[in-house]
Image (spheres, helix red, strand yellow):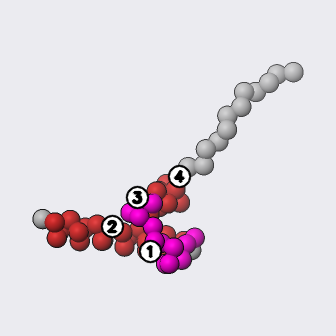
Amino acid sequence: MSRKLQQALEQQREYYINKLLLIGVYDSLVLDGMTMSELKTEYNYFFYDVPSKKVSPIKKA
């Protein structure tokens, strides 16, 4: 069981690294030093983060 888990984690890490390398934000040296949670956070930031829009009330004159 632990061998399958280790392989799954390695595949997931490789997936995140390949996707982040694809957009060219990081180089492989930086990505190799990141933890799994950091890779996931960066991946979600670049691929799923919707820019937040600041809502301001409309002032009537």
Q: Is residue 47 visible?
A: no
Query: At label 3, which amino acid type do we have?
Result: Ser
Picture residue at 16% right of the left edge, 66% below the top: 2
- The residue lying furthest to the front in this view is 33
**Residue extending farthest top:** 61
Q: Which residue is mark 2?
A: 12
CA neighbours of label 3 inside 10 A, class few (<14), some (14 to 19), many (20+)? few
* Residue at mark 4: 49
Query: How far is the residue under mark 3 from the one under mark 2?
Result: 11 Å
Which mark is first along the chain, 1 or 3?
Answer: 1
Q: Which residue is mark 1?
A: 32
Task: Give the magenta-colored segment's residue range.
Answer: 25-38
Give percent across and percent down for residue 54.
67, 38
**Comes first in the chain, label 3 or label 2:** 2
Other-residue count near label 4 (Cα within 10 Å), few / some / many at <14 / 14–19 / ≥20: few
Q: What residue is rendered at 76% in x and 27% in y?
A: 58
Under circle 1, the secondary element is helix
Quadrant that contains the N terminus: bottom left
